[in-house]
Image (cartoon, helix red, strand yellow):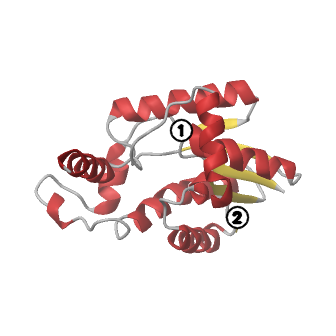
Amino acid sequence: MNILLHTCCGNCAVAPFKMLKSEGHSVTGFWFNPNIHPLEEYDSRLQSLKKLTSQRNIDMLFWEDYQPADYFDMLGVTSTNLELIPPSPGRCRPCYELRLGKTAEEASKKGFDAFSTTLLISPYQDFDQIAAAGKKISAKYKIDFYLKDFRHSFRDSMSEAKELGLYSQKYCGCVFSRAESKDRQGSRRKV
């Protein structure tokens, strides 16, 4: 099967690319992540992924135009209603749908058989929400969503990413998860 794999970061990409290729699939990565904030974090993750794809000779399509407004618009966020944004995992489904929707759209345009995502490797992501979003998007774009639980390979992927010298992020990506991460770090320091 020819799969377009939404790729959130280099760390999460290591094992899924390896596993899908070992199953005989042709895999091309797709970078589209307007949720990542701030720009410096976006650039760090993008450069890390480029390092991985260069080292591993991975085919990639990069949507490099940094447009966080797409993410904030999708959530209906303005500077006056930030407090109305639900906590994780409530705010995550629209984000999954935004990124998987763009991936499915590109996969459909470029003649792929299916699309999937490296988000399926993280035990910190909501697997069921990702699966539901993938199925919804699959029906909309009439292209298969390749659902695979990569979570059993998460630690191996992170370990290999560290050996490769890839950037390791401290939060999911959005401004809200960044704030939550800082809150958790602050409360651990106080203990």
Badge 1 marks a residue whose secondary structure is loop
Residue positioned 37% across, 50% down in the render: 70
- The answer to whether mark 1 and mark 2 are in CB contact below 8 A is no
N-terminal of the pair, mark 1 or mark 2, is: 1
Q: Name the residue under label 1.
A: 63
> Which residue is depicted at the point 59% across and 42% down?
158
Vertical side of 172 occupied by 39: above or below: above
Instruction: Give the distance between the C-alpha atoms of the residues marked 1 and 2, in whole angstroms.
Output: 24 Å
In the figure, residue 52 lies in which quadrant? top right
**Residue type beneath disc 1:** Trp
Closer to the camera in the image, 124 or 88? 124
Q: Residues within 10 Å of mark 1 (few under 14, many from 20)?
A: few
Q: Where is residue 11 in the image (x, y as percent from the top left)?
A: 58, 40
Q: How many marks?
A: 2
Q: Where is residue 48 in the image (x, y as percent from the top left)?
A: 54, 29
Where is residue 34? Give x, y as percent: 41, 45
Q: Label 2 neighbourhood size at 10 Å, few (<14), some (14-19), many (20+)?
A: some
Q: In this view, does 134 lie to the left or right of 170?
A: right
Q: Which amino acid does label 2 sit on?
A: Lys
Rendered image: mark on residue 95: none
Indicate the position of residue 186 as horizontal and vertical percent values.
21, 46
Q: Mark 2 points at which residue?
A: 148
- Which residue is the extreme one toward the left? 80
Instruction: Kindly report which numbered mark, 1 or 2, lies closer to the viewer in this rendering.
Output: 2
Q: Secondary structure beneath disc 2?
A: loop
**Horizontal placement of 143 versus 154: left or right?**
right
Closer to us: 155 or 42: 155
